[in-house]
Amino acid sequence: MYVHEALARTLADHGVDTVFGVVGDANLYLMDAFQRQTGGRFVSMASETGVVLAANGFARTSGRPGVATVTHGPALTNTVTALVESARDHTPLVLLAGDTAVSDRENLQNIAQREVVLPTGAGFEQVRAPETAVEDLATALRRAVLERRPVVLNMPVDFQWEPVDYQPSSATWAEPQAVNPDPAAMDEAVGAIASARRPVVLAGQGAATSEARRALLRLATRIGAPVATTLRARDLFRGQPHDLGIFGTLAGEVALDTILESDCVIAFGASLNSWTTAEGSLLHGKRVVQVDTDRRALDQVPGVRVGVVGDAVAVADGIVGWLDEAEVKPTGFASPERAERLAGSTEGRFADCSTDTTVDIRLALDRLENAFPRERTLVLDGGRFIFHAFRRLRVPEPRAYIHTVNFGSIGLGMGTAVGAALGAADRPVLLVTGDGGFMLGGLAEFSTAVRHGLDLVVVVLNDGAYGAEHVLLRNKGVDPAISMFEWPDLAPVATALGGRGFTVRNPAELEGVLAAIEVRDRPVLIDVKLDPDAVPSLK
Ligand SMILES: Cc1ncc(C[n+]2csc(CCOP(=O)(O)OP(=O)(O)O)c2C)c(N)n1
């Protein structure tokens, strides 16, 4: 067997059935063998940025490591932004990158690949020799899962046609285990919680599982605490009467009042970053108990009084047990009145400023929220529209929300959406993007979605501008012309690419299109025309 065949076999041995890629001379035979000899699915993307983004989206929705492949040199440099995004997203992902033969000094595509990769935050594994290739791939897969980040496997092209004796290798790693907390830390935590009058339970991405949800709700009920999440754990408690929604700068009015009133925050698997805490102000003067499996996550925030290393379920249940033993009474903070205030909140209401030729962004999002299937995957690109989208669009569970702005880049939504659609094929994907982000990174991968027949609706909130820059210019009294664009009409472009394109200029057209997309037989693009001066500023 040749090295490229052994690598393909190793992917299959590890349960990898889908690889996203763009092929070139350094990964071509590997992908051919993967498809032909193992029956794997090779998903060809339009660009290498899309390759890594799609693997990221796939990993996010499927819960399995994403696998991607590119050839050497410019193909690898094209992945840099997407690698940074995936590294900051803590996504387990392996990028199989071809590399120029060491002896091939004059090769146009030669570049020091390790030096390209390391600043992105991704790990790097070298295929050291033909006979270590299988082991090196298994190591890359294991590292990606355990380190929760992308790992680039660097595969010199000259090894790939070397014969090897294939020895199946199955990298194994221990399953995640419950980490029981230190009794001394628990004692301190229980002390803080038992004396709280107005506690709130906060879940972050590290506690966004259904088991953690149940345990956190048991704790919240036991102590009479409203519940909240970070952005990344959004909608974990959806439907609960005391769900405050997102804790932080995105909190609604009643939630914010509740957070400000509270005297104790018990945070599970949340990094307590500056958005969650509004630069620390939301935790000011409160007792804070922070629970995380990773000790490094604790005590980074000024004012955290008690840090507990432990699994969310073990700690939450442990706290309940200790409180029961000490016969501590529940507080009345999660009162029926508070639930009523949360349910009856009128925030989000607005005076519609749609016209005959433009739609109010809030109306567009609210109608979309109601008309699009509830069981969805939601992918958001970046831009000023995102602050409206964060507040108005929901997901059935945290894993269905795909964040693409960990690096503050626009244009990463479309590639990510392709992978997200394949990772959770039972849910339609809703991608919401600005016109700038779509033109920067979306157009080419829309055609990928068409080629692979994905169930995807792209909504372009089209203000004909880089809205984020438009408002900056307006705020300084500068003519916003430099931020304005006369893009081609996107609906016919989407149709020409093989999808179905719709233009929405007013609320009546919006209704017609929302009815039309109930039946989807190919990727859809809805170009919603907005007035760039009528998008309210939010942060
Ligand atoms: C890769 C990249 N290039 C440029 C920027 C700067 N930038 C931030 S927001 C934005 C405009 C986005 O416009 P659009 O997608 O239409 O969304 P809108 O702001 O209009 O809602 C730009 C260019 C960026 N964040 N990332």
Image (cartoon, helix red, strand yellow):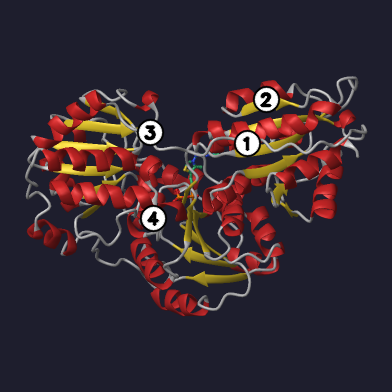
Are the two marked residues, 1 and 4, in contact with CB atoms closer than 8 angstroms? no
Bin the neighbour count of mark 2 within 10 Å (Cα to Cα): few under 14, some 14-19, many 20 and up.
Answer: some
Kindly identify which residue carries mark 2.
Answer: 116
Are the two marked residues, 2 and 3, in contact with CB atoms closer than 8 angstroms? no
Question: Which is more foreground, mark 1 or mark 2?
Answer: 1
Mark 1 or 3, nearer chain start: 1
Residue 235 is situated, as x and y percent measured from the top left of the image, at: 34, 55
Kind of residue at disc 3: Val
Kindly identify which residue carries mark 3.
Answer: 179
- Residue drawn 86% across and 31% down? 157
- Helix, strand or loop at disc 3? loop
Relative height, residue 199 to residue 112 (above, below): below
Q: Which mark is residue 66?
A: none
Bin the neighbour count of mark 1 within 10 Å (Cα to Cα): few under 14, some 14-19, many 20 and up.
Answer: few
Mark 1 or 4, nearer chain start: 1
Residue 221 is situated, as x and y percent measured from the top left of the image, at: 17, 52
**CA separation in Å, label 1 and label 4:** 40 Å
Mark 2 or 3, nearer chain start: 2
- Helix, strand or loop at disc 4? helix
Kindly identify which residue carries mark 4.
Answer: 389
